[in-house]
Image (cartoon, rainbow, N blue to C red):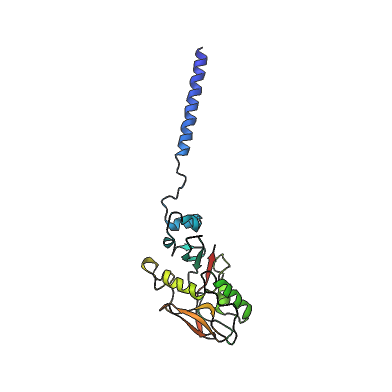
């Protein structure tokens, strides 16, 4: 009888220990990054869409991600635009003066890549602005392109000279003209001034600065 009681006591002790271990495991917080900053969330591998569940889109603008700086975030689907950290050229031609590049007229955010593709197909001149962006290789990403007018204007106001607070010229842009991927006519293409934010056209044989961007979905 004493032996049976002893066995029962041992069993109860073991069961109690296992229960304590289970309770200890469940007490460990699931989200170890619960108090992390937006940048820490991005660095940890969380997607932008996941971060948008707890943070507003504006708080993601200006953070480093995907080889550059985030300058536009679509809060509905987590798609975003990223600009490279520095200029790829301080004086490049748009190229192929005298030739209209059909199709290089898209203006919506994220569509500059289609303009760049059309420029690449319609202009064989080497070393032009669109080529410089296409062959930008200082990061692990290979999908960089020449931004359109809308994309340039967006970065001017979100992380450029017209941005407020900590984002003011976070992209370290020059107060100069930057080529867009938008054609104007056979001899001219559009630039955006990062001094005023105004878009104007210049001869394709003239030079302007180049800054590559990429889109993520």
Residue 34 position, x and y percent, is: 43, 50
Does residue 214 lie above or below 10 as drawn?
A: below
Figure disc tally:
0
Does residue 154 lie above or below 187 as drawn?
A: above
Residue 19 position, x and y percent, is: 48, 31
* Residue at 49 percent of width and 60 percent of height: 76
* Res 136 quadrant in image: bottom right
For the question of whether residue 159 can be seen, the reply is no
Residue 106 position, x and y percent, is: 55, 74
* Residue at 48 percent of width and 74 percent of height: 152
Q: Pick the residue in front: 151 or 13.
A: 151
For the question of whether residue 54 can be seen, the reply is yes
* Residue at 55 percent of width and 85 percent of height: 185
Residue 82 position, x and y percent, is: 50, 67
Hey, which residue is sitting farthest left in the picture?
165
Quadrant of image for the C terminus: bottom right
Hey, which residue is sitting farthest top in the picture?
1
């Amino acid at each position: 009888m004493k032996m049976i009681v002893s066995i029962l006591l041992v069993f109860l002790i073991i069961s109690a220990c296992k229960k304590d271990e289970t309770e200890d495991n469940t007490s460990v917080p699931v989200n170890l990054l619960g108090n992390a900053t937006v940048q820490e969330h991005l660095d940890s591998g969380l997607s932008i869409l996941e971060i948008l569940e707890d943070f507003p889109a504006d708080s993601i603008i200006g953070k480093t991600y995907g080889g550059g700086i985030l300058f536009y975030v679509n809060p509905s689907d987590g798609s975003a635009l990223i600009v490279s950290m520095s200029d790829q050229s301080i004086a490049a031609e748009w190229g192929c003066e005298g030739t209209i590049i059909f199709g290089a007229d898209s203006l919506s955010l994220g569509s500059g890549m289609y303009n760049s593709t059309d420029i690449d197909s319609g202009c064989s001149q080497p070393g032009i602005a669109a080529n410089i962006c296409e062959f930008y290789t200082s990061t692990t990403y290979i999908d960089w392109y020449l931004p359109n007018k809308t994309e340039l204007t967006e970065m001017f106001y979100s992380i450029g000279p017209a941005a407020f607070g900590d984002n003011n010229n976070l992209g370290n842009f020059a107060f100069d003209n930057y080529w867009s991927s938008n054609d104007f006519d056979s001899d001219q293409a559009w630039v955006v001034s990062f001094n005023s934010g105004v878009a104007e056209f210049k001869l394709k044989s003239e030079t302007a600065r180049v800054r590559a961007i990429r889109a993520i979905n």
